[in-house]
Amino acid sequence: MERTVEISESWLGRALKAIRSPKMANAGWTLFFLLPYLIGLVVFVAGPIIAAFAISFTRWDILTAPIFIGLKNYQNLIQDELFWQSLYNTLYYIVLIVPAEILLAFFLALAINRSLGGITVYRAVLFMPFVLSLASIGLLWAWLYSPDFGLINYALKSLHLPTLTWLANTTWAMPAIVLTSVWRNAGYYMVIFLAGLQGIPGELYEAANLDGAGPLKRLWHVTIPLLSPTTFFILVIAVIWAFHVFDLTYIMTRGGPSNATYTMVYFIYESGFRWYKMGYASALAFILFAVTMVITIVQFVVQRRWVYYQ
């Protein structure tokens, strides 16, 4: 009896008592149910990231053992004209697509944020392109852009306008891919904007009406400020997604013509799986990660000046 009392007063006794408490039991069960996810996170996310970072300091062609070369891959990338071309094309793609996606999605959300007969069908039709695979969308739009039998050139001919070789033209190839991406993604962002619009209290519009505000003033002074958190969220994910454009450039142009649509992710793919330069591809991937991270941090810093939280 005396020995039991000694144990209960020691640190071991207190630890055993804490483990047996309901709070610790709940924490244990929570950890148990999270364990499969944590294992998957370590094995399939954290592990490959660490391995890729290590590979970026090597010269490795998959078939032979990797050779440690330090920062050589990063130095070569800085001197590689194709790297700067791919970075320029990626930023050009982002500058074109992000404003277009956000503006189109915003006005589509405004248009369907009302009680009309069949409005659910309209929303479903606008959202439908997002559920299609990028491969099928790329093939569909490549056919639409065809200089021989594409519907877009056919429409231009009908209007007596000059036709274009869209995907074979260094000036128009990237805008053509941007148009395809906007058509696919605008419905997804529209749904997010729609949720934000329906979260704005109706009392604010009633108060604005009493003050004599017209539709444009209500849009400018009520809708846009209260939607700014939603706009900021869409801006961040749209920029991150745009940095990773690959599928459409691979299917529609293969980076051409004359590298006009050669993006950074396409460069990573070719370096790693066509030229078997895994170290070079890994270094390029981490530079892409760094650029994306810097721009995302800048967005979070700047958002304090224009995002309004209720």
Image (spheres, rainbow, N blue to C red):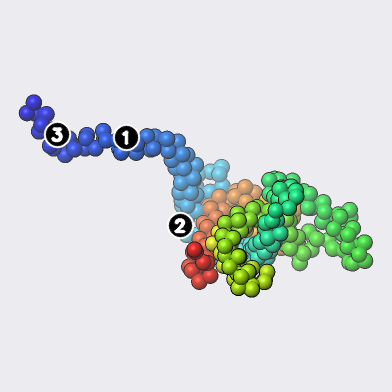
**Residue furthest to the top:** 1
**Residue type highlighted by circle 1:** Ala
Q: Residues within 10 Å of mark 1 (few under 14, many from 20)?
A: few
Between residues 21 and 259, which one lies in front from this camera angle? 21
**Residue type highlighted by circle 3:** Ser
**Residue indicated by mark 3:** 8
Q: Tag count in the figure?
A: 3
Relative to 10, is 223 on the left or the right?
right
**Residue indicated by mark 1:** 25
Residue 113, above or below 42? below
First-in-chain label (2 vs 3): 3
Q: CA distance from mark 1 to mark 2?
A: 48 Å
Position in image of residue 88 (x %, y %): 63, 66
Q: CA distance from mark 3 to mark 1?
A: 19 Å
Relative to 104, is 1 on the left or the right?
left
Residue 270, above or below 302? above
**Residue indicated by mark 2:** 70
Q: Quadrant of residue 1?
A: top left
Position in image of residue 208 (x %, y %): 60, 69
Residue 64, above or below 285? above
First-in-chain label (1 vs 2): 1
The residue shown at (64%, 53%) is 191
Position in image of residue 279 (x %, y %): 53, 52
Whether residue 184 is visible to the viewer of this picture, yes or no, is no
Q: Residues within 10 Å of mark 3 (few under 14, many from 20)?
A: some
Relative to 254, is 223 on the left or the right?
left
First-in-chain label (3 vs 1): 3
Whether residue 162 is visible to the viewer of this picture, yes or no, is yes
**Nearest-to-viewer mark from 1 and 2:** 1
